[in-house]
Image: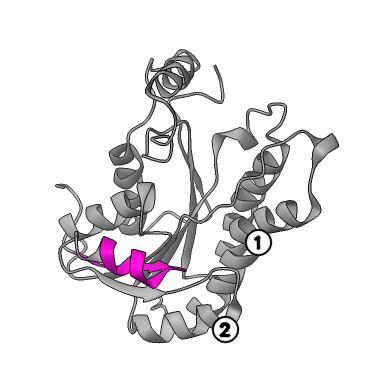
């Protein structure tokens, strides 16, 4: 990775054990930072950390405030936080499950708020937090109502928190369809069809890659005059 210099900054990546989170942790290391991979499964966090230069691992369950506090303590000094957690509940409104709906809000909104509550007391004034929204908030679609609402709430949270916690910078990234690894459990044909359809629903004619997102994260970590912003990295899908 070139163009970004983290100069030893310690970046806590919650949800960093796989997919986009792991790509972010890897990019942090390539930019000269120290990624601290946080996950609710410490073994998975440690396995991921073993694959990334200088990476460390901590146990953080975003749904458990005590775990957040202990995880931040274990992480030690941190300069930035990136939160990629989610728990999708993609069904029609008529078939919503209360507990799964609550879990979606817990992973995307409530848990990150609790993490920021505690991280804001230990981050330096030059620090930042990057949250993850998603293009579905700007492109409503049947069966994706909960995803759209939670992603939209993340964007509003970034602006609200940026105002209250200044000079700490709070931003969000809103990815489009990303071939992140999370679809690898599908059959090859089903995944191919999904990616092809998504590429057509994009102004740039392709789906996103993990490095599209990790580059955006690095930019936000180093963009000291940017706060309260949602950065759309979706290939224009919200307009297509």
Q: Which residue is mark 1?
A: 106
Please say whether residue 218 is visible from this viewpoint.
no
Q: Is residue 38 magenta?
A: yes
What segment is highlighted magenta in the picture?
33-48
- Name which quarter of the figure residue 16 lies in: bottom left
Q: Residues within 10 Å of mark 2 (few under 14, many from 20)?
A: few
First in sequence: mark 2 or mark 1?
A: 2
Residue 174 position (above or below residue 71) = above
Q: How is the image coloured?
A: one colour
Residue 178 position in % (x across, y down): 41, 34
Question: Left of 222 or right of it: where is 232?
Answer: right
Q: Residue at x 42, y 24 (%)?
A: 191
Q: Residue at x 77, y 33 (%)?
A: 92
Q: Residue at x 38, y 70 (%)?
A: 127
Q: Which residue is mark 2?
A: 66
Q: Nearer the viewer, residue 232 or 73?
A: 73
Element carrying mark 2: helix
Q: On the rendered image, what quadrant is the C terminus found in? A: top right
């Amino acid at each position: 990775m070139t163009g970004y210099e983290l100069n030893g900054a310690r970046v806590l990546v919650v949800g960093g054990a796989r997919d986009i989170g792991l790509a972010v942790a890897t990019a942090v290391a390539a930019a000269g930072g120290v990624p601290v991979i946080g996950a609710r499964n410490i073994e998975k966090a440690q396995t991921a950390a073993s694959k990334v230069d200088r990476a460390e691992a901590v146990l953080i369950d975003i749904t458990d405030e005590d775990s957040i506090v202990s995880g931040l303590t274990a992480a030690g000094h941190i300069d930035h936080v990136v939160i990629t957690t989610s728990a999708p509940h993609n069904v029609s409104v008529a078939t919503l499950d209360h507990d799964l709906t609550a879990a979606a809000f817990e992973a995307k909104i409530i848990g990150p708020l609790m993490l920021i509550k505690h991280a804001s007391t230990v981050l330096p004034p030059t620090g930042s937090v990057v949250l993850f929204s998603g293009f579905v908030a700007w492109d409503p679609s049947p069966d994706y109502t909960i995803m759209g609402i939670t992603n939209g709430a993340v964007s509003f949270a970034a602006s609200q928190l940026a105002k209250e916690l200044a000079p700490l910078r709070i931003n969000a990234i809103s990815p489009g369809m990303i071939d992140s690894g999370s679809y690898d459990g599908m059959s090859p044909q089903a995944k191919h069809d999904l990616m092809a359809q998504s590429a057509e629903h994009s102004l740039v004619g392709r789906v996103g890659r993990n490095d599209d997102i990790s580059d955006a994260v690095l930019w936000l970590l180093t963009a000291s005059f940017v706060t309260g912003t949602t950065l759309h990295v979706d290939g224009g899908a919200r307009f297509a």
